[in-house]
Image (cartoon, grey):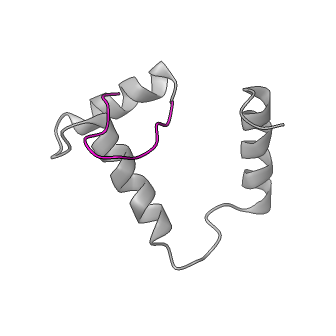
């Protein structure tokens, strides 16, 4: 991903995910992977406060993040 044009944080995603995003944004109005990811995350934060994952989905996600070394 390219460097953000304004101050912010860096988020690292796998090359596979980055390539998938690049393929998805080609026909869209998004100029970069960064712009798309920021848009998607902003929409998630606009959610009405409902939990976006079931308890089971959250458990599986945490297991995946743990196996990748992102969380203890």
Residue 25, horizontal then vertical, whole percent: 25, 38
* Along the line of sight, the residue nearer the viewer: 11 or 48: 11
The magenta segment is 1-12
Q: Residue at x 44, y 55 (%)?
A: 41
**Which residue, as the protein is rendered here, is positioned at the far bottom?**
48
Q: Residue at x 34, y 54 (%)?
A: 39
Q: Classify residue 20 as left or right of residue 16.
A: left
Q: Residue at x 75, y 27 (%)?
A: 69
Q: Classify residue 41 as left or right of residue 72.
A: left
Residue 38 versus residue 25 in the image, above or below:
below
Residue 20 versus residue 51 in the image, above or below:
above
Q: Residue at x 47, y 21 (%)?
A: 16
* Along the line of sight, the residue nearer the viewer: 7 or 71: 7
**Which residue, as the protein is rendered here, is positioned at the far right?**
72
Residue 10, horizontal then vertical, whole percent: 46, 36
Quadrant location of residue 24? Answer: top left
Residue 26, horizontal then vertical, whole percent: 19, 33
Q: Main secondary structure of the magenta part?
A: loop
Q: Classify residue 13 as left or right of residue 30.
A: right
Residue 39 versus residue 33 in the image, above or below:
below
Q: Is residue 40 magenta?
A: no
Locate the C terminus by quadrant.
top right
Q: Classify residue 5 as left or right of residue 57.
A: left
**Which residue, as the protein is rendered here, is positioned at the far front?**
7
* Along the line of sight, the residue nearer the viewer: 20 or 35: 35
Q: Is residue 7 magenta?
A: yes
Residue 56, horizontal then vertical, whole percent: 79, 55
Quadrant location of residue 1? Answer: top left
């Amino acid at each position: 991903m390219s460097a953000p044009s304004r101050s912010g944080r860096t988020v690292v995603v796998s090359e596979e995910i980055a390539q998938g995003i690049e393929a998805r944004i080609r026909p869209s109005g998004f100029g970069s992977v960064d712009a798309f990811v920021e848009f998607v995350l902003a929409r998630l934060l606009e959610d009405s406060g409902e939990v976006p994952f079931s308890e089971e989905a959250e458990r599986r996600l945490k297991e995946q993040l743990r196996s990748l070394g992102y969380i203890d």
